[in-house]
Image (spheres, rainbow, N blue to C red):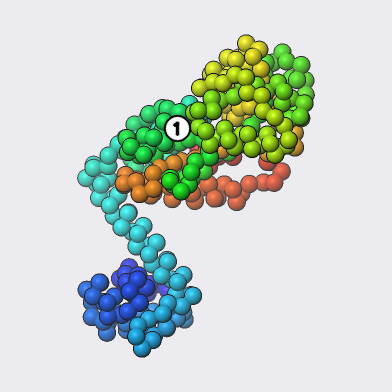
Amino acid sequence: MSDSLTFRLLRYIKASAATLNFTRAAEQVFVAQSSLSHQIGKLEDNIDVAIFDRLQNGLKITPAGRIVAAYAENTLREWDQMLVMARAVQRNEVPPLRLGFSSFINAKLLEKFREGYEGMFSGCVIQLMSGDPLLSLQRLDARTLDCAILPLPIDTSLYSVQQIAQSPLVVCMRSDDALAEHAQLDIRDVAPRITIFRDPELQPSAHSRLLEMFAEVDIPIHLTCSARTPGEIQWMVKERYGLALIDQLSPLDPGLITRPLAELNWTADTAFVYLNHADHVALPFIERFLRETWTDSRRRKSPTKSRIPEQMELLV
């Protein structure tokens, strides 16, 4: 796009698209109507794009103009956010980022998130608060948390959700289990022994998704033991209460091993979550950076490495 597309012109375009009237748009941006319409017309000539159709009773935005107007609105919003953040950093006025997390989140994700945050906003503080996913979401609703790193799924109609990691679900067992001799396991053979699960009350939506996954392969779920932490799950496995599905990235206690499931792409997915319309000044920058990095990591994914856990560069 032409270098003549300055912030001033972006504001002219945004106001004109909102009002569909050059006169009312000029009043919004405190400029003469003749100057605003002339500069938009000159821009249209320079970039060879008709942004507006001029009508007798106002304006009509063109299909191409909608693209330009959306760019103008997004760019101006990001500019305003950047100014607010830059001023807050300069004045040492950035409030602590209150970050919630679930015990089922790999600790390295939190470590790398902190490193990335400090890289973006040096000297800005993170305050951690652990809790099960449902409690963390309640704290977001009550605004006692600014954001959280939680297992998916999360209701995207209520929260801004950006996936940041994905890794296969694997079967956790004792290292002396007969199944340890197999490189991969068939879910139909091993399902009756998978009896240890995360407590459904910790995140009902995640448990519902688990039920759907089992139903998709026509296998009943045998939930006889439930746990509130990864440590409890692994203790139950060691004590021979059954097998469990866990995140491949989870660190294992001594005496335990994992084996992948054959022909299934069941994954543990993790997301950065915050309340829609949350007001911490850093959140738009964090979310944008995580979104772009996750998109890049997905684009670079090799089809031959589908069993390798994926994490954003920030979190590798």
Q: Residue at x 66, y 12 (%)?
A: 240
Mark 1 falls on what kind of element? helix
Q: Residues within 10 Å of mark 1 (few under 14, many from 20)?
A: some
Q: Nearer the viewer, residue 203 or 282?
A: 203
Q: Nearer the viewer, residue 131 or 204?
A: 204
Q: Tell me the quarter of the picture where residue 159 sits.
A: top left
View extreme (bottom): residue = 56
In the rendered structure, which amino acid carries the disc numbered 1? Leu
Q: Residue 55: horizontal and vertical position, in percent?
A: 38, 86
The reply, left or right, for residue 280 in relation to residue 191 is left
Q: Tell me the quarter of the picture where residue 3 sits.
A: bottom left
Which residue is tagged 1? 134
Image height of 193 relative to 20, above or below: above
Q: Nearer the viewer, residue 254 or 236?
A: 236
Q: Residue at x 49, y 28 (%)?
A: 202
Image height of 214 relative to 192, above or below: below
Q: Residue at x 75, y 20 (%)?
A: 179
Tell me if residue 111 can be seen.
no
Picture mark count: 1
**Quadrant (top left, top right, bottom left, bottom right) of the N terminus:** bottom left
Image height of 206 relative to 69, above or below: above
The reply, left or right, for residue 144 in relation to residue 292 is left
Q: Tell me the quarter of the picture where residue 220 sits.
A: top right
View extreme (top): residue = 239
Image height of 132 relative to 43, above or below: above
Q: Residue 284: horizontal and vertical position, in percent?
A: 38, 49
Q: Residue 134: horizontal and vertical position, in percent?
A: 45, 32
Tell me if residue 35 can be seen.
yes
